[in-house]
Amino acid sequence: MSFTFLARMPVFQPIPLGQRIPGSPHSVACSLPTMRDVIGYEEGRPETTKHIASGYPRFVVHTHAKRLCEHLARRPELAGQSLWLVTSPKMAAALADHLGRNGPAAATPFSADGLAGVAHTDTPELNTRGKVFLQNIGGFLSSRAAEDHLLRLGLLPATAPEKLFTGDATAEIRRVLRGPFPVAATDLLLAPSGMNALYAAFRAINTVQARTGRTAWVQLGWLYLDSIALLKKFTPDPARDYLRHGDVTDLTGLEKLFAAHGPRIAGLIIEAPTNPLIQTADIAAVTALARRHGAKVILDPAVSSPFNVDLLPHADLVATSLTKYTAHEGDVIAGAVVVNAARPDAAELRELVAANLEPLHPRDLARLAAQIGATPEVVARINTNARQVAVFLESHPAVDKVWWALQPATRANYLKIARTPESVGSMISFTLKGPLARFYDAVRLPKGPSFGMTTTLISPFIYLAHYDLVTSEAGRAELAAHGLSPDLLRLSVGTEPVNEIIASLAEALG
């Protein structure tokens, strides 16, 4: 395949540090245009963080939420305390339990003006623990909920203008999702984030399986960081119950793991494909193995989208992010759990999932419903672009290695679950033969986290997701053991003209 570049004004222009991508106050990405900015963000350097008003909602507390906290902090009972605002009183209780309700640093559920939260002694250790807990399970108050509260309190003159669905938003979202998931409405449950969906699915299966002494979970391949955190932190005894099988293609090794631990295994969490190496296991074979041993399976199709891969027949529960692809304009965070009604314990799992999910703010529902109808068309355009970009990167002499849905090692496995041979998704990861910083600083593409947007995004993913591993010798060794380079770049291909995407990459690659 040849590529021709025309002399014209490029689509992609530099985006300043901290600017929201794509520009809404509720954008889920913000610009980190240089490696120095990435490192400054990760290390919390004031010269970097002062430019960042918002970012991916589970990692960066939105300015609206901060302003609400500042307003509430004037209450006498909150003097000298920190406050986390959360999705519901149930989440506030869980956070207070996690931080500890007794002792000199006691955490206390807080409720006022229709808001739920947790107040605790203002210490760096408790602040970090609270933030990480809410990040791991998706418990932060949404930016639109915070904005609506500020408006009601007279602290904002108006909410930001945006297109909202005016009918039954939940029904519209379910209508579109029943394309890839032809299930009853009661089997399609919505969440305020993909991680909250995964957490609810994980908790539901834990409850059912613990009755027969099954408490262990298997991580297949390298998962997204918060999915790993669920297994490391929320199994009853992580030293005993957190089991890892690193090679998604090694079915023999997985069979040996089940032979050794089968009666204890509650379930598996499987990304299909994985993030960020975009590797696909033989899903039918893995789930058949799990079923023979009485284990349940959570499948996550977020990397490619359920509009590209068909996983429900193989799963007990599908848990996925709707922030990607369905909220393709990049300004809503949401998730879903889908119950496979044909599997044992489906009725109880449905009830338990619903009990563990957090509520979605009505305006987030209305915003998602306003854009979700275009998802099939958007996904098709992304698929077409991504295939061409992958071919370009695979053929470029400055590129060392490329991972994507149709990479040779797991192509056959991916095609078994793909809805069509063209259904590849937006994500492409790659490494370079030259310095990471030189390329990253030079490339004119938008630079920030997230994927599955109409806007192309590129990021030094391992630096953003696993900075603790990148910056230690032991961490780098752990990454290497799982086939991950600290210098891996994750590209999410958008719907812009594909020649413009390729031209921007070619310019920076030299």
Image (cartoon, grey):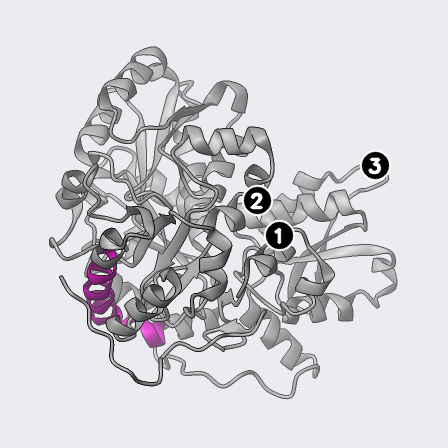
The tag on residue 42 is 1
The tag on residue 103 is 3
**Dot 1 and dot 2 residues touching (CB under 8 Å):** yes
Magenta stretch secondary structure, dominant = helix
**Dot 2 and dot 3 residues touching (CB under 8 Å):** no
Observer-nearest of 211 and 129: 129
Label 2: few (<14), some (14–19) or many (≥20) C-alpha neighbours in 10 Å: some
| Local secondary structure at mark 2 | helix
The tag on residue 467 is 2
State the CA–CA distance, disc 1 to disc 2: 7 Å
Chain part drawn in magenta? 369-390
Taking the view exactly as shown, the residue that stands out farthest to the bottom is: 157
Q: Is residue 231 visible?
A: yes
Q: Is 355 positioned to the left or the right of 57 in the image?
A: left
Give the mark nearer the N terminus: 1 vs 2: 1
Q: Closer to the observer: label 1 or label 3?
A: 1
Q: Is residue 237 visible?
A: no
Q: Is 498 positioned to the left or the right of 352 in the image?
A: left
State the CA–CA distance, disc 2 to disc 3: 33 Å
State the CA–CA distance, disc 1 to disc 3: 32 Å
Q: Is 132 positioned to the left or the right of 458 in the image?
A: right
Q: Position of residue 292 (x, y in %)?
A: 22, 21
Residue at 64% x, 56% y is 40
* In the image, residue 382 lies in the stretch drawn in magenta: yes
Check the picture and name the quadrant holding the N terminus. Answer: bottom left
Q: Could you tell me the amino acid type at mark 1?
A: Glu
Q: Closer to the observer: label 2 or label 3?
A: 2
Give the mark nearer the N terminus: 1 vs 3: 1
Q: Position of residue 280 (x, y in %)?
A: 25, 39
Q: Position of residue 374 (x, y in %)?
A: 26, 73
